Image (spheres, helix red, strand yellow):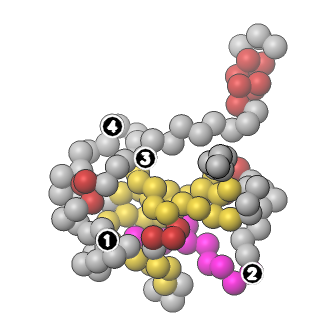
Amino acid sequence: MDSPLLRRLRDLPTFEMATGDPDPRGWAVRGSDGKPFGTVHELLVDPVGQRVLYLDVVLATGLPGVPAPAPHTDQRILLPLAAVNLDPEGSSVFVTSLNHDNISRYPLFVDFILPVDFEEIMREKLGLS
């Protein structure tokens, strides 16, 4: 089975969330200890399957064991939507399997997805089209 092509929600202007589904971008992400360890930055979507698969989370600075990010960058992780609980009333996302003590063992995410037309625009600006 092929893996779905993931896209950032912000790159899909015609994608609509299902009626009643909250948009958790900007919400605090809390672990089993209730303490926030990050903020939802973006949603990664399977445009063919028409569903959100992952939350792109920016980690808070100063978490134990998490290296400081390079200048002008953030440390980020991906969380499968199936592994979190959304609390629309509290504008929070809960991940019971993570907390301040073990977040440093979770793999970091590097956003390497390029817009579909990026190469074409780049070549055009360099006069290579």
Q: Earlier in the sequence, mark 2 or mark 1?
A: 2
Residue on which the image places disc 2: 19
The numbered disc on residue 78 is: none
Does residue 111 show up? yes
**Which x, y percent locates residue 32?**
29, 77
69 in relation to 78, above or below: above
Q: Amino acid at mark 4?
A: Ala
Residue on which the image places disc 3: 109
- Between label 4 and label 3, give the one nearer the viewer: 3
- Between label 1 and label 4, give the one nearer the viewer: 1
The residue shown at (50%, 57%) is 56
Magenta-drawn segment: 19-30
Classify mark 3: residues with Cα within 10 Å, few (<14), some (14-19) or many (20+): some
Image quadrant where residue 19 sits: bottom right
Give the CA distance from mark 2 to mark 1.
Answer: 28 Å
Residue 10 drawn in magenta: no
Residue nearer the viewer, 6 or 124: 6
Q: Amino acid at mark 1?
A: Ser
Q: Earlier in the sequence, mark 1 or mark 4?
A: 4
- Between label 4 and label 2, give the one nearer the viewer: 2
Does residue 41 show up? no
Q: Earlier in the sequence, mark 4 or mark 3?
A: 4
Residue nearer the viewer, 5 or 117: 5
Give the CA distance from mark 4 to mark 2.
Answer: 39 Å
Image quadrant where residue 38 sits: bottom left
Residue furthest to the bottom in view is: 89
Residue on which the image places disc 4: 70
